[in-house]
Image: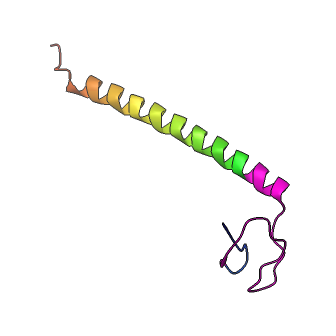
Amino acid sequence: MGFCISCGQQHQDGIRFCRFCGTQQPGEQLLMRLRQEAEQIHYLRLQMQAAQQQQMAANNQFQQQPPRW
């Protein structure tokens, strides 16, 4: 199931025009490409979050060490 890109109504996959507002819907090739791009963005976001968590853990470890004077 998909959603109209114009009015947001739910429709079946593979339709060419929304039955509610008549707007032409993207083709399957475009949808496939957009899904692949979304997966890549999601993967990059997860990598960035992991790197930020590692950086925060390293900063916390540095701050928790007592001064050596």
Give left or right: position of 56 versus 24.
Answer: left
In the image, residue 67 sits, relative to residue 14, either above or below, namely above
Q: Quadrant of the C terminus?
A: top left
**Residue drawn at the location 66% of the way across and 49% of the way down:** 38
Counting from the top left corner in percent of width and height, residue 55 is at 41, 30
**Residue drawn at the location 81% of the way across and 84% of the way down:** 22
**Residue 23, located in which quarter of the rendered image?**
bottom right
Give left or right: position of 21 versus 38.
Answer: right
Give left or right: position of 5 versus 45.
Answer: right
In the image, residue 26 sits, relative to residue 69, either above or below, namely below
Span colored in magenta: 8-34
Q: Is residue 9 magenta?
A: yes
**Residue drawn at the location 16% of the way across and 20% of the way down:** 66
**Residue 28, located in which quarter of the rendered image?**
bottom right
Q: Residue furthest bottom?
A: 20
Counting from the top left corner in percent of width and height, residue 46 is at 52, 39
Counting from the top left corner in percent of width and height, residue 26 is at 82, 65
